[in-house]
Amino acid sequence: MIEIAPKDLDALHSLQSFLRKHKKWQDLLMALERELEVGATDRLAVLKEIARVWEKQLRNTFEAKDAWNRVLKAHAN
């Protein structure tokens, strides 16, 4: 779906819902990053979700720390 409609936020949101439902966390992270690239409406919310996926779903504290740092930088701006 990303290749078919790479800049369609509605399509990305539908894909993200599907990936959450099916617990495809790595694919969800790619879709969330893609949303940031094409202009997320709520950039901070997307960054927070990325951090939560790394922390809670994938239990990768190293990546989670980096993701939370991205949130802090975005919040400071």
Image (spheres, rainbow, N blue to C red):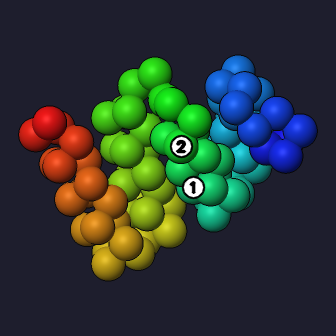
- Helix or strand or loop: what does disc 2 sit on? helix
**Quadrant in the picture for residue 46:** top left
Q: Which residue is mark 2?
A: 37
Q: Give residue 25's position: percent from left, percent from top.
A: 62, 59
In the image, is 46 to the left or to the right of 32?
left
Q: Is residue 75 above or below residue 61?
A: above
Disc number placed over residue 29 in the picture, else none: 1
* Residue at mark 2 to residue at mark 1: CA–CA distance: 12 Å
Q: Nearer the viewer, residue 5 or 58?
A: 5
Discs 2/1, front: 2
| Mark 1 surroundings: few (<14), some (14-19) or many (≥20) residues within 10 A | many
Which residue is outermost to the left?
Answer: 76
For the point 51% across and 31% down, which residue is it?
39
Disc number placed over residue 76 in the picture, else none: none
**Quadrant in the picture for residue 10:** top right
Which residue is outermost to the right?
Answer: 4
Q: Give residue 67's position: percent from left, percent from top.
A: 32, 60
Q: Is tag 2's residue or tag 1's residue first in the polypeptide sequence?
A: 1
Q: Nearer the viewer, residue 74 or 51?
A: 74
